[in-house]
Image (tube, rainbow, N blue to C red):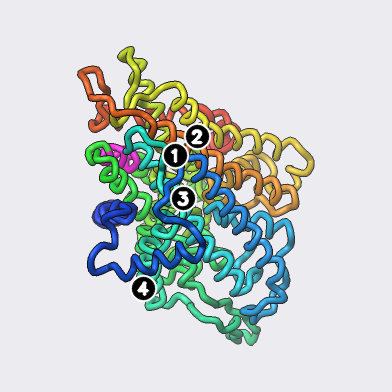
Amino acid sequence: MSSQGISQVLVYGIVLIALSYPLGIYMSRVYDRERFLAGRLGWLRAIERGFYRTIGTDSSKEQDWKSYAKTVLVFSVLFSGLLYAIQRLQAHLFLNPDHLPAVPSHIALNTTASFVTNTNWQYYGGEYTMSYLSQMTGLAVQQFVSAGVGMAVLAAVIRGISRRSTTELGNFWVDLYRSCTYVLLPLALILTVILISQGVPQTFSGHATATTLEGATQTIARGPAASMISIKQLGTNGGGFYNSNSAVPFENPNGLTNFLEMIAILLIPAAQVFMFGRMVLARRHAWMVFAAMFAMFAIGVAVNYPAEQHGSAVLRASGVNITQGNGSSGGNMQDKEVRFGLANSAIWTTATSDASNGSVNAGLDAQTPAGGSVPLINLFVGEVIFGGVGSGLYGMFFYIIIAVFVAGLMVGRTPEWLGKKIEAREIKYAALGALFVPTMVLAMTAVAIVTKSGLASVYNPGVHGFTETLYAYTSQSNNNGSAFAGYGATNFSAEFGTVALYLGRFVPMLAALALAGSIGRKKIVPASAGTFRTDGATFVVLLIGVIVLTAGLMILPALTLGPIVEGLG
C-alpha cells in the first residue's frame, strides 16, 4: 500500500467521524417529539401538522409494535403497486422525451421490490430503460421513502429499548415525516447542489447527439441525474441513474465528488450510532458499538486494498506492469477508474458493502478472489458494519443481544442490556433477525445452481459462476444491490430475486420491532457487580467475535466453493 493511499483512507475515517457525530446529536433531537421544532421554528411544526391532517392521522397517538409493523407493511404494499404501475405505463406517460417503451413485467416486478426495500438491485440500464418520470417520481421518490421507513423503524426500536414498562414505540407517520423532511431532504439538497456545480447533469432535455472524430453519431444520455445520485448515496440506496453507476463521469466527475459520495454512503448510518447513545442515555456504550463497526470497516479496507494492490498472480507471472491512478506501478486496475486509483476503489468497495448501498465506482467482478471476498463477507454478516439507514443499527442490536447472552452464560446469570433483562423471548427474536437472511441466502443459492431455470441465469461456468450466484442472492437478501457481473436477468432470477428482496427486508424488520416491543415492557434492573459492562473494550472484542462466528461459520463452506478455490487456483 502506498503512503498516498493510506493517507486517503485515514482522511476518510477522520472526516466520517467528524461529520457523523454532530449529525447524530441533531438526529436525536429530530425524533424527540416534545423538544424538536420549538420556538422560532414553530412554522415548520405547523407544516408538519398540516401533513398529518391531510393523511388523517393523529400524531399524538402512539402505536405498539404490532400496529407499527402493520402500518409499515401496508404503506410498503401501496407504494409497490404505484411503482410497478409507473414502470409498466411509462410509454404512455409524460417526461419521456426519448420515447422509451414500458419496462418488461419481470424487470418491473424485481425493480419494484428492489426500490421499495431500499436495495436498488438493478437488472436494467437506467439511461436506456427508465423514462425521466420513472426515474424521478418512481425510483428517486422510493429512495427517500424506503430510507425513511428504515430510519423510522430504528427510532421506534430505540424507544422500545430506552422506555420502561410500556408497549408504545411512537407513531410511524411522525417518524417517517421527520426522517424524510428534516434529515434526508436537507442533506440531499446540499449534496445535489454540489454535484451540479461539479458537472453532474440535472435537466429534462432528451439525450444529446454528438458526432465523433471518425464521423459516427453518438448518443449521450443525460437527465435529472444529480438529484437522484445524492439520495442514492445518503439513503444507502445505491441505484444509479446510469448503468455503470458511479464509475460514469456524469455521476462522479472528479476526486471531490468521489470523496463526498463515499462519505455520504456511511454518514447517516454512522450518525445513527451516536443518535442511539443519546436517546438511550448510554453514550459510552454507543462509542463501543461504533468502535466495533469501525474496526470491522478498517479490516475490510486493510484486506481489499493490498489484495488489489498485489493484483493477479497470472499477470505478475507474465510480467505485465499495470499503472495505478496515483502513478505508482503494480496492482489490479481491471475495471478500476484511473481517476481515483486503488485506495479510493477499496474504500468505496468496503463502504458500499458495509452499508446497504450497493453503488460502485469500480467493477466488483474483476477484483481478485481475496479482494472480492471482502464485499461478499460484509454483506453476509447482515450489513451491520454501519449498515443501511436504520436497518444496519437495528440489525446490530440482534448481535448485541446474542453477545450479552453469551456473556451471561459465562458468568452464570441472566444477561442484561442497558438495564433490561434479556430472556428467552428476546433471544428468539435476536436469533431470527440474525440468522434468517444468511440461511435464506444459502438455500436460494443452492436452488439457483441445481435447477435448470436457475442455471440459465449463470452466464459464467465453473467456480466463478458459483461466486457470482452466491453474491447475487447475498446482495438481494441483505438489501444491498451491488452485483458481480455474469448473473443474468431471466424470468427465474428476477422473480426468485423478488422473493429474496421482500423477505430480506421485512423479516428482520418485524423481528426488530417485536424485540423492541418485548424489551419495552420490561422494568429497569439496577446494575450489580455481576452485570456485564457494555461500555469497554472487552465488549467490543466480544461483539466482533460473535458477528464473525455467527455469520462466518455459515458462509465459510460457501467460500470454499467459490473465492477460496479461485484464490488457490
The front one of 402 and 341 is 402
Type of the residue with mark 1: Gly
Tell me the CA gap for discs 1 and 4.
32 Å
Instruction: Give SS at disc 1.
Output: helix
| Viewer-side label of 2, 4 | 2
Which span is picked out in magenta? 286-295
Tell me the CA gap for discs 3 and 2.
15 Å
Rendered location of residue 241, percent (x, y): 54, 67
Quadrant that contains the C terminus: top right
Instruction: Judge whether residue 288 is colored magenta.
Output: yes
Type of the residue with mark 3: Gly
Which sits earlier in the primary sequence, circle 3 or circle 2? 3
The front one of 181 and 18 is 181
Rendered location of residue 475, percent (x, y): 56, 46
Determine which residue is flagged by label 2: 433
Type of the residue with mark 4: Ile
Residue 150 is marked as 3
| Circles 1, 4 touching at the beta carbon (< 8 Å) | no
Determine which residue is flagged by label 1: 395
Few, some or many C-alpha atoms within 10 Å of disc 2 (few <14, some 14-19, many ≥20)? Answer: many
**Could you tell me which residue is drawn at 55 percent across and 43 percent down?**
506
The front one of 91 and 72 is 72
| Circles 2, 1 touching at the beta carbon (< 8 Å) | yes
Which sits earlier in the primary sequence, circle 1 or circle 4? 4
Tell me the CA gap for discs 2 and 4.
38 Å
Q: Is residue 374 visible?
A: no
Tell me the CA gap for discs 3 and 4.
26 Å
Which sits earlier in the primary sequence, circle 3 or circle 4? 3
Tell me the CA gap for discs 2 and 1.
7 Å
Determine which residue is flagged by label 4: 194
Instruction: Give SS at disc 4.
Output: helix
